[in-house]
Amino acid sequence: MNIDLTRLNNDIDDEVIIDEHLEFTEDQLINTDLMELKNVLVKGIITKQSIDYNVKLEITGVMVLRCAVTLEPVNYPFNITIDEKLGEIIEEISEIVKKSENTIDIFPIIWENILVEIPMKVVSEKAQNYQAEGNGWKLITETEPIEEINPELEKLKELL
């Protein structure tokens, strides 16, 4: 997503307006927890401030992730706001961002911010009260207290 900064550099325009709908391929989602990214919309402006640029972006969309319990797809809406100086952003992810004198590719900035927003775990509404158990095992949730103590480890209490 290359942005032309020529008119901004030559003081013809005060800002560059960004209003783009992004599509992501399956190859881009490899090695992430994302199954799919839908309806990703990037809106914002880039302004010049003396020797640097100020980037203000709002990224919205829907991440499709696997449910931590059932592994079914779960839609997870996101809204990301970026308001930073371009020099600081490039310093953080300098290997990825391609900037020449008159253009900048802001896709890596957008991609990095989307990856940071991926939650550690999502649970679908269907699996909120899901109780899984089988022969000799039971799924213990974070809210359930653990009551059983292993008899072999019970003898260790005497040593303490």
Image (cartoon, rainbow, N blue to C red):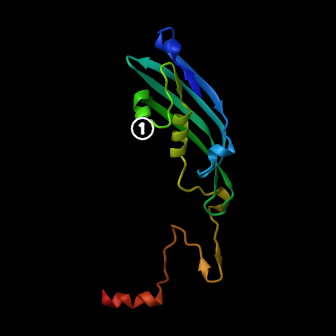
Secondary structure at badge 1 equals helix
Residue 63 can be seen, yes or no? no
- Where 138 falls versus 108 (above or below)? below
Residue 159 at what x, y percent from top left?
31, 89
- Where 63 falls versus 135 (above or below)? above
Residue 15 can be seen, yes or no? yes
The residue labelled by disc 1 is 92
The residue furthest top is 12
- Where 53 falls versus 74 (above or below)? above
- The image quadrant where one finds the N terminus is top right
Closest to the observer, 122 or 3: 3
Amino acid residing under circle 1: Glu
Residue 30 at what x, y percent from top left?
62, 49
Residue found 47% across the figure and 9% down from its top: 11
- Where 89 falls versus 30 (above or below)? above
Q: Quadrant of residue 18?
A: top right
- The image quadrant where one finds the C terminus is bottom left
